[in-house]
Image (cartoon, rainbow, N blue to C red):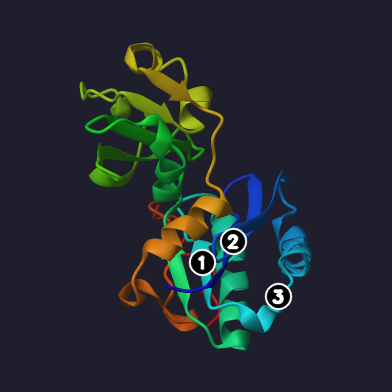
């Protein structure tokens, strides 16, 4: 298992960076729309100083690869690619929906189901469903992009998490009222990205040129290719 993990999350308006050094965790986070690119590198320098290690001591990079803001996803991946190339270390790509589910693990008892959903703009949501099985969350509804009302399909979701349940509270009112817990204020965080990365085997690590964003929405054809 990597000793020192540096995680970056820029896919939403909440920007965060986490340095996991063994059992110790150091992090920075702020609600900072359009400031992600300016904040991440200074935060990394501050966390390295706080943890009393050098950048060269990082063993693994972890990054949120989406879904989320197209610009945010690209900023995070580009930063991870640059650091990976310069340090010659691998990257652990993690889904924002999985990270959001991981953040909510403590609220889900064994056998309960969890639906995470993020506002995707354009009257759509990014969503995925999970069920707790012991200490793990098994994915029972793969990530998808859909209209918010499509989430209320008769399935029994006990826990609801993510911004979609605030932005689309009216069309999701029945789903929300029947849930045991609804928390629309949570967003993906680098601390959860680091925890998930620590659980991944080397088979899930990639090099800078091989990392793939998760967009779900197809209207990114005119975007320039990510640097390699």
Note whether 33 is above or below 176 in the view shown: below
Say what secondary structure mark 2 lies in. Answer: strand
Give percent across and percent down for residue 137: 29, 44
Note whether 79 is above or below 104 in the view shown: below
* Distance CA(mark 2)–CA(mark 3): 18 Å
* Distance CA(mark 1)–CA(mark 2): 6 Å
Q: Nearer the viewer, residue 9 or 170?
A: 9
- The residue indicated by pointer 2 is 8
Q: Closer to the N terminus: mark 2 or mark 3?
A: 2
- The residue indicated by pointer 1 is 62
Q: Closer to the N terminus: mark 1 or mark 2?
A: 2
Give percent across and percent down for residue 74: 56, 64
Can you see residue 11? no
* Distance CA(mark 1)–CA(mark 3): 18 Å
Q: Nearer the viewer, residue 25 or 144?
A: 25
Q: Quadrant of residue 171?
A: top left
Note whether 166 is above or below 5 in the view shown: above
Q: Closer to the N terminus: mark 1 or mark 3?
A: 3
- The residue indicated by pointer 3 is 53
User: Residue 154's mark?
Assistant: none
Q: For the residues labelled 1 and 2, say whether their Cβ atoms are less than 8 Å apart.
A: yes
- Residue shown at the point (31%, 28%) measured from the top left: 151
Q: Nearer the viewer, residue 49 or 157?
A: 49
């Amino acid at each position: 298992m990597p000793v020192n993990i540096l995680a970056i999350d820029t896919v939403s308006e909440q920007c965060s960076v986490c340095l996991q050094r063994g059992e110790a965790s150091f992090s920075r986070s702020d609600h900072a729309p359009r400031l992600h690119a300016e904040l991440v590198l200074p935060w990394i320098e501050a966390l390295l100083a706080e943890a009393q290690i050098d950048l060269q001591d990082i063993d693994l990079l972890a990054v949120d690869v989406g879904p989320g803001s197209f610009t945010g996803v690209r900023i995070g991946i580009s930063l991870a690619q640059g650091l990976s190339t310069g340090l010659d270390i691998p990257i652990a790509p993690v889904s924002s929906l999985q990270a959001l589910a991981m953040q909510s693990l403590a609220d889900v008892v064994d056998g309960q189901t969890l639906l995470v959903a993020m506002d995707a703009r354009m009257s759509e949501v990014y969503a995925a469903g999970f069920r707790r099985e012991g200490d793990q969350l098994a994915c029972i509804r793969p990530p998808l992009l859909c209209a918010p009302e499509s989430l209320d399909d008769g399935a029994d979701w006990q826990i609801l998490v993510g911004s979609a349940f605030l932005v689309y509270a009216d069309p999701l009112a029945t789903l929300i009222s029947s849930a045991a817990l609804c928390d629309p204020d949570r967003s993906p965080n680098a601390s959860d990205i680091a925890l998930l990365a620590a659980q991944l085997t080397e088979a899930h690590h990639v090099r800078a040129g091989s990392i793939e964003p998760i967009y779900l929405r197809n209207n990114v054809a005119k975007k320039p290719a990510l640097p390699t």
